[in-house]
Amino acid sequence: MEDTVTTSRIVIVEDNEVVKDGFALLLNGIDKYEVVNSYIKCEDALKNLKSDSPDIILMDLELPGMHGVEGIQRIKKELPEVNIIVITVHEDSDLVFQALCAGASGYITKTANYSSLLEAIDEVNAGGAPMSKNIARMVVESFQKNQDSPLTKRETEVLELLSKGKSYSIISEELFIHKETVKSHIKNIYFKLQVHSKAEAIEKALKDKLI
Amino acid sequence: MEDTVTTSRIVIVEDNEVVKDGFALLLNGIDKYEVVNSYIKCEDALKNLKSDSPDIILMDLELPGMHGVEGIQRIKKELPEVNIIVITVHEDSDLVFQALCAGASGYITKTANYSSLLEAIDEVNAGGAPMSKNIARMVVESFQKNQDSPLTKRETEVLELLSKGKSYSIISEELFIHKETVKSHIKNIYFKLQVHSKAEAIEKALKDKLI
DNA sequence: AATCCAATACTACATATTGGGGTAAATTAC
DNA sequence: GTAATTTACCCCAATATGTAGTATTGGATT
């Protein structure tokens, strides 16, 4: 009698055949993992997604044809419950956040050691989100605001509301101050940030993590 | 000759004295860690911050007096280089994000096992961001967009730019389409989201993770 | 006590933006 | 080949925005 409950159905998407087959060989050598299929393109993986019905997909981002980020998006749309772990050489911050936004549940960088791959698979199965050290730090730091903001507390508050698309009138109502006071604050914000419009202010504020 | 390079100066802020002293005892029993001081309140930790000059602060969030989230903020303002690891029983999502926004570099939940605490310390020292499984998953999921958006790709694009404070004119320039087309898209967005203004649309979009 | 900064509020003015009502062609996707 | 998407245009009135000033108050710092 097979114990299917503890066996993870795994699909690999990786254009480097040596790496792809290496992963498959490694994983198939362990009872609790089963590589149901492996592909060199997202397009192929998508075609067989339903029949493969993987629990976990290991995928590279730099692939021939469709980019991995879009691949993640499409795969998650079709099979929302699948856990996708990105395995790549890229630590580029934009790419990391794009992949996570697209629906990746983990992001680990390719290293010489295979044990971290196995740990990552076990970790998503346990409801976690495996990430390499640097990636985890990048992700956590993305939440943190600049501690040396030139703006006062009130100005920051106003700018935050402005960034939510609220008008001067609405901001004044929410902060229980006069509309003209809001205008004063915004004038000061624009001067401090050296900008001349809402869009520029928000852009700079996001870039400098002032809000 | 002491090897100060590999010794981590640690401060503990924890109101449960048994836990506090337990941590201190555990860490002081290992050469590479040195608990320089431990407190039951953030206020006390802040007073001695400069003289303690810790590399790492382990802190609870629920504390008498100042709340841990504000404590993190103040500590990071004074000592930006310190790595703060939150150690708490709370897995409440708001609290997690507040702590990370305030400047925490790690967030682990209190468990019976002490080895995860030691691992967490080593991980921040290595430039990582230690998190419990559930916390990591919460953090990663916070990036993910709703896969069942009622909006089309173009509409999402328009709404994204709108949420950055850009006017119809600017959006039309950036997307190389006519301003009237932008208006059409926005009219459709408002209809689909059942809203009647920019602020409402952005609010709903953020709430439903459409952007 | 003197000074600075933050937060508040006002006047005035020109221009730009927004939201609502319609309609409809061209393109893309299934 | 039909449906959905993307594109573009008309009209209109109300509201919002950005700029330029001035000025009072309260709290903190020195």
Image (cartoon, coloured by chain):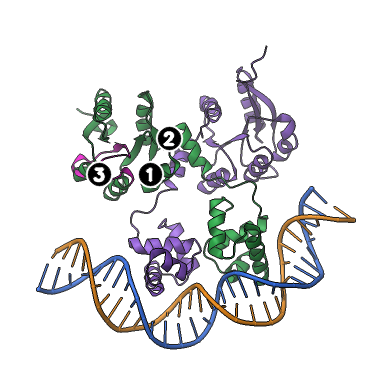
Chain colours: A purple, B green, C blue, D orange
Out of C1 and A105, give the one closest to the viewer: C1
The residue at the point 62 percent across, 58 percent down is B193
In the rendered structure, the residue with mark 2 lies on which chain? Answer: B
- The span from disc 1 to disc 3 (Cα, nearest Å) is 17 Å
- The span from disc 1 to disc 2 (Cα, nearest Å) is 12 Å
Say left or right for B94 vs A117.
left
The residue at the point 53 percent across, 44 percent down is A96
Task: Tell me where residue D27 sits by quadrant.
Answer: bottom left
Measured as percent of width and height from the top left, residue B188 is found at 67, 62
Say left or right for A105 vs A133.
right
In this picture, is A73 found above or below D7? above
State the SS at label 1: helix
Q: Are the two marked residues, 1 and 3, in contact with CB atoms closer than 8 angstroms?
A: no
Residue under label 1? B99
- The span from disc 3 to disc 2 (Cα, nearest Å) is 26 Å
State the SS at label 3: loop
Amino acid at circle 1: Ala
Residue under label 3? B65
Amino acid at circle 2: Met
Q: Sequence-wise, which precedes: disc 1 or disc 2?
A: 1
Q: Are marks 1 and 2 on the same chain?
A: yes
Disc 3: CA contacts within 10 A as few (<14), some (14-19) or many (>=20): few
Disc 2: CA contacts within 10 A as few (<14), some (14-19) or many (>=20): many
Residue under label 2? B131
Q: Sequence-wise, which precedes: disc 1 or disc 3?
A: 3
Range of magenta residues: B50-69
Measured as percent of width and height from the top left, residue A163 is found at 48, 62
- Labels 3, 2: front one: 3
- Labels 1, 2: front one: 1
